[in-house]
Amino acid sequence: MLRFVRSSLSFAAPMLLLYLLASPAAAAPARLSHRVTHGAMAGEEIQFSNATYTTTEAATFMYSVTVSCNPVPTTTVTVTWDIVAGGTATSGADYTDGGGTVDFLNGEGSKTFDVEILADSIDEPDETINLVLTNPQGGAVLGAQATAVLTIQDDGDTPPSVSISVSAVSYDEDAGSQQLLVNLSGPSGHTVSVVVDATDGTAEDPDDYAAPISPVTFSPGAISSNILIAIADDFRDEPNETFTVTISAPSFATLGATTSCVVTIVDDEPPPELVFSASGSNVDESAGDETISVFLSAASDLTVTVDFDSVDGVALGGSDFTALTGTLTFAPGETSKDIIYTILEDNFEESAEQFTLQLSGPTNATLGAVSIFTVTIRANSEDVPKKKDTSNCAATPGNSAPAAVLILLGLVAAARLRRRRV
């Protein structure tokens, strides 16, 4: 006869004692013992129901994250949840930071906790929040899925527009490097870029400016950047010059209202000076044509003009030299011009005589220190003396000079008569 008796002893696993009972007349029973082990019972496993969760930012709301407990607990078990670093979403801008405890009561195999998602109007890439479960209590343990990622999808916000801050700007020629401001209409979660080009006008690259660096970028969240412009100083007097900066082909943005800017380079060089090559010259009466040069102190990119005239001194225009007047014109880049003047020979013996050439009325230049040129016509001793004018010797009333001559002549005649008598 077999009898099964549960042992009243405490074992890690139940033990059944198998007794083989013989007939009452049999000797003392022989005892057969056998242990049956079911294995140690593990605690309930708590984990995220999914490795990833996805939502949108269309409006501010509470997003529920599901956590599961398996097997279903018979007593209360808990676990702590937190948001940890490493996600691309920003606390306070994309979500509200949080954390807490999830309680599983008897018979509850699934619970949720809420993460507040914040709506914004910024065009941005999808962003992530990293979630983690820790510190299980009540005999529970963490399952394999103790971490999860919550992705916030952008809801199609309109990208910002990009514009140059001004449509025209002026820089002095000696300004060097300058910054031209470029603005976004609003922040973006993307890195925004825009292509920059420059087109010659009267200013030329690289003589007057250096082409700007392209592209220009905006870091996420930034709303302004700069186009770098380098102005070249060429040390020549010239008109103000222009070139045009344009933006195009933006990424993660659209083109705004102002996509080009005319840049004016304001010349800062003083105008050059006009001077004769010498202050004067000595020439013979027989010299004929002579030349004197007029110089610009520096080349100019402007057309320069200056008037010139001859001015009588002792020498007279028309008899001692050919009177002249005119205008010299210096084309851009020219630095010298000549004036030809002509000396006239009159064949009369006379002393040295002078006249001058003078500069006046310059345009795009100023007169220098030597703006008058003096010409000296040397005396010529080989010339025939000029006939003496005796018209003033005629007797006129009140003129005593003729009477004295008559008296002198009378005395000379009387002396000759006395010699003859002797």
Image (cartoon, grey):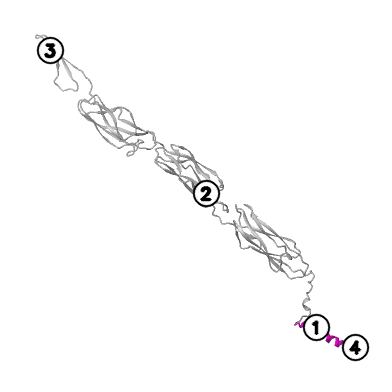
Using the numbered discs, state the Cα–Cα distance from disc 3 to disc 1 in whole angstroms: 206 Å
Q: Is residue 198 visible?
A: yes
- Residue 346 location, x and y as percent? 77, 66
Q: Closer to the N terminus: mark 3 or mark 4?
A: 3
Q: Which residue lies furthest to the bottom in this view?
A: 422
Q: Residue 296 occupies which quadrant of the picture? A: bottom right
Q: Residue under circle 3?
A: 29
Q: Quadrant of the C terminus?
A: bottom right
Q: Is mark 2 on a helix, strand or loop?
A: strand
User: Which-is-in-front pick, marks 3 and 2?
Assistant: 2
At a point 17% along the width and 18% down the height, the residue shown is 15
Residue 40 appears left or right of 288: left
Give the main secondary structure of the magenta stretch.
helix
User: Which-is-in-front pick, marks 4 and 1?
Assistant: 1
Residue type at the position of mark 3: Pro
Using the numbered discs, state the Cα–Cα distance from disc 3 to disc 4 in whole angstroms: 224 Å
Q: Residue furthest front?
A: 397
- Residue 304 location, x and y as percent? 62, 55
| Residue 420 badge | 4
Q: Closer to the N terminus: mark 1 or mark 2?
A: 2
Using the numbered discs, state the Cα–Cα distance from disc 3 to disc 2 in whole angstroms: 120 Å
Residue type at the position of mark 2: Thr
Using the numbered discs, state the Cα–Cα distance from disc 1 to disc 2 in whole angstroms: 89 Å
Q: Closer to the N terminus: mark 3 or mark 2?
A: 3
Q: Residue 359 occupies which quadrant of the picture? A: bottom right
Q: Nearer the viewer, residue 182 or 297?
A: 182
